[in-house]
Amino acid sequence: MSELKELSWDVQETVQPLPFEALERRGIRRRRRRHALTGLGVVAAVTLAVLAAVLPLGNVTGTEKTAGTPASIPVDQAAEKLIHNKKSGASGIAFATPTRWAAGWLLPQPGYTWNYAAVLSRDGVRTTAPVRKNQYVVLRAGDEALALSMPTSTKGTDPTWAQSVMVRLTDQGRIEKKLRWAPPTSEFDDGEVLLAYGTLRALNLETGVLREVKIPGVDNAYEPFRDNTGRWWMVGAKNSGVGNIYWTDDRGKTWDHSIIGAGRTGGQLAVSPDGKTLVVIPGMKPRAPGKPGAPGDLLPLRLSTDGGRQWTTVAGRNAPYLSSPVAFGNGTGLALYQGKKRELLRPGAGAPYTPPPDLGQLSAVGDFVYGMQYNGNQTITSTDHGKTWKYFEPR
């Protein structure tokens, strides 16, 4: 199981890189979560009682009724077997609303290989994505959570495109499409979703076309997020490491940017649904060519409540233990500090909380906050901006 967990964190590192030194002294490797990964839209708040009634799901056999239609969803027995195997491990989760989510699972195979599957749940209706050799990425698109088995590269000649698949669970039922390659572009359509794992890509939900999006001056892109105005935000960086906040209001025709932290590499960004509250953690200072900054570098936690025009430094914590910024529409946010004293920092909101001891990262959908355990398969959720937490296992 230790090998499985190690790979689980490796998978998540590929999806969203984070300095893992913060948790090496705990004998684990944790994944960085921001959301989940990528997303758009406003989320209505729900009570913990409703969440508890909807989220815990047991084993499923036979067929399941789809949302909004009397048809049935066939159950993929191979996927169910993988997901419920005692040796399986959760590789990530993404919420679209508090009752709509997708979670990836992996299972070790002989010869140091792995099989992957995913679970999708929509307001209590559940389905699975088929078993694949390529890892599943789960992400948010508006009020929908998706599961993608990704190709191993953006090249159209990559043979793994043939096995790549997108699975959705909509109000019309389960939708499965092969992912299709298209040449790189500098612009994208209004209905497409951006995702970034170093390379920025645009996904067309209707056709399954996945293509690279090129931005002048940007070699690596992370954390794309669309606010309610239609603006797309992201962190962009050159290979030299310098990171900036980028945004576009015209689907990539033009981009504006501002510096996250002068002389710092990369960085982490969170944006509230209305685009007004921004929480930023600049990256570490480089010590020498090709070498990252060492632990002990003081990272500033910065807050803006006017869309990034003015900034306030609200706290400073040692790198690389500060991570996972979250931004709310009321001008406040969260960030997780996992140093000697664990803290759930609350920029703009007051004194820190003490986070759950096994909370390894944070993501948010509106006011709903969540994160995976760093030493287990459960998801930890909060509906009161991190004051109280609840656990469930997303199988």
Image (cartoon, grey):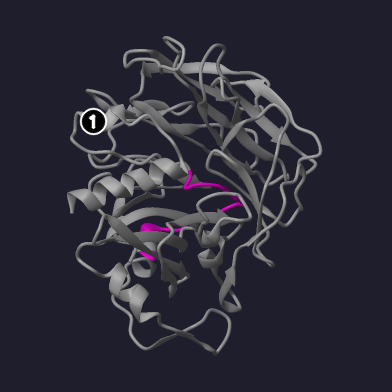
Q: Residue at x 65, y 41 (%)?
A: 274
Q: Quadrant of residue 229?
A: top right
Relative to 350, residue 141 above or below: below
Q: Residue at x 41, y 18 (%)?
A: 292
Q: Quadrant of the C terminus?
A: bottom left
**Residue 323 in the image, given as x and y percentages of width and height:** 40, 30
Q: Residue at x 70, y 34 (%)?
A: 247
User: Range of the magenta residues?
Assistant: 35-50
Main secondary structure along the magenta-highlighted residues: loop
Judged from the image, the secondary structure of the residue bearing numbered disc 1 is: helix
Q: Nearer the viewer, residue 238 or 367?
A: 238
In this view of the protein, can residue 45 be seen by the observer?
no
**Residue 393 in the image, given as x and y percentages of width and height:** 29, 61
Q: Residue at x 34, y 15 (%)?
A: 294
Horizontal arrangement in the rendering, residue 190 relative to residue 321 (left or right):
right
In this view of the protein, can residue 319 be seen by the observer?
yes
Horizontal arrangement in the rendering, residue 154 relative to residue 213 (left or right):
left
**Residue 182 in the image, given as x and y percentages of width and height:** 70, 56
User: Could you tell me the amino acid type at mark 1?
Assistant: Glu
Q: Nearer the viewer, residue 277 or 226?
A: 226
Q: Nearer the viewer, residue 305 or 220?
A: 220
Mark 1 = which residue? Answer: 24
Q: Quadrant of the N terminus?
A: bottom left
Is residue 42 located in the magenta-colored stretch of the structure? Answer: yes
Q: Are there few (<14), some (14-19), or many (20+) residues within 10 Å of tag 1?
A: few
Relative to 184, residue 342 above or below: above
Is residue 342 located in the magenta-colored stretch of the structure? Answer: no
Q: Quadrant of residue 239?
A: top right
Horizontal arrangement in the rendering, residue 111 relative to residue 40 (left or right):
left
Q: Nearer the viewer, residue 43 or 219?
A: 219
